Each structure stands twice: as structure tokens, then as C-alpha cells.
Image (cartoon, rainbow, N blue to C red):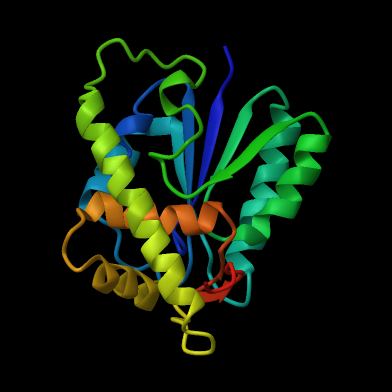
Amino acid sequence: MQTNYILIDFENVHVKSLALLDVEQFNVRVFLGPKNTRIPTDLVLAMKALGERADYIVLSAGGHNALDFHITYYLGKLAAADPTANFYIISKDTGFDSLIDHIKNSGINCQRVVSIETLPGMAQLPGIDTTSAKKTPAKKKSASKKKTLALIDLVLANLAKRKGALPRTEKTLRSTIKQISAALHSDDELAAAFDHLVASAYIRIDGTKISYQLPAAT
């Protein structure tokens, strides 16, 4: 049975819950930078519950891309020790993508996702039983998806017209998306819109900074 290694870039994605990873086939590594001095209690307790399947990697000193290099190093060690496993980096930093492509070309399954919830085929990952999972009603899920897609269109149109006046940090961009939403969307829909921008390469996150590759304004 394959093992799924989850490497969490906590400096980039502040994961609060590991509930979806509380399965034997998951091994979790949480990478912390020197500024990550406050960790949610739920995360600490969840890591403790996973026992030997979970570990923290704490940087003693910071620096540009320091955490990324640590993740790369441990990914290499794990892949060398267990090349048949699945590896998932949870980060919004697209800088990992070229490394991941290289690893995949070596025959190792490795992917980057922006959250635990967006792990590819979360319900179908090896060894995961979904028969008892709670499901969102299809109509409600479809309506929420349509609202999210409509919000994404509004956000892209708004950003494309801003030219040089674009939000330059994740915090300000999320705030901008919320303003564009005009309180008509749920927190999940706002988060989904942001994740879509990252996954579609409309935005690139490097540490706390954001750069853009937006469609032309119409």
C-alpha cells in the first residue's frame, strides 16, 4: 500500500486542521520558518495524534527561499527512501513547479496543491475510504461553483483594468477579492476564487509578494 507524504509550507499556507489526513497512509511534515512562532492549537494536537507519521522541520534562521530549499532537501530524502510513494507539497508558491516537473520525469509522483482540501482526487487518494464521508448536496455545490466562477470573472476583469495599481501581497489581494465580492459570497467561495487564480497561473506567489500574468482588459 502506497504512502502519501504531505509536505506543508506553513510559511506560505497556514493550515489549521489535519482532519482529512487522519488516515494511516498519510505522513505529514510541517515546515516552519523562524517567524512561525504561533501555531494553531488544533494543528498541534492533530500532529501529536498522528504520532510517528508527523514531524516538524523548523528553520533556525531565515533567508530568501530558505524554507523552499529545506522542503526540496527533505523531498529528495523521502523520495530516495520510498520512490514508490506519492508526494504532495502544499504551497501557493509556484516556484516549486519546475522542480516537481523534473521529479515527475524521473518516475516519481509529485504534485503541488494550494491546500489540503484541494489535494487531487482527495476522496480517491490511495487507501482513503470515502463511503462515510459527508457530501454536499449536488444542487448546492453546483450553485456555489457558479457563484465562484462568476466572482473569478469579476476579479480578473477588475485586476486587468488596474494596470500598475495591483495588490502586491496575498493579504491585500484577498482583501481586494472580498471587496469585489460585495459580501455576496461565502468565505469558502472567496478562498476558492483566490486558489483558482493561483492554480491558473494568473498570479504567482513568491514568499509574501505576488506577481501577475493577467488576461488583457476588455
Outermost residue toward the left? Answer: 183
Using the image, determine if residue 211 lies above or below residue 146.
below
| Residue found at x 48% / y 67% | 33
Q: Classify residue 77 by image quadrant.
A: top right
Residue 76 position, x and y percent, is: 72, 43
Q: Camera-side residue: 217 or 103?
A: 217
- Quadrant housing the N terminus: top right
Image height check: is 142 above or below 195? above
| Residue 81 x %, y % | 71, 30
Query: In which image quadrant can residue 17 be found?
Result: top left
Q: Nearer the viewer, residue 77 or 176?
A: 176
Identified at 53% across, 89% down, the residue is 164
Query: In this rendering, does residue 15 appear at all?
Result: no
The reply to whether residue 42 is visible in this rendering is yes
Residue in front for this viewpoint, 19 or 192? 192
Residue at point 42%, 17% (across, down) = 128
Left or right of 39 on screen, residue 52:
right
Does residue 7 appear left or right of residue 36 in this picture?
right
Check the image and name the residue furthest to the bottom: 164
Disc tally is 0
Residue at the right extreme of this rendering:
106
216 and 25: which is toward the camera: 216
The correct choice, above or below, for 115 with respect to 201 in the image is: above
Q: Percent from the top left, x then y, of residue 189? A: 28, 51
User: Residue 205 at x, y = what percent?
Assistant: 55, 67
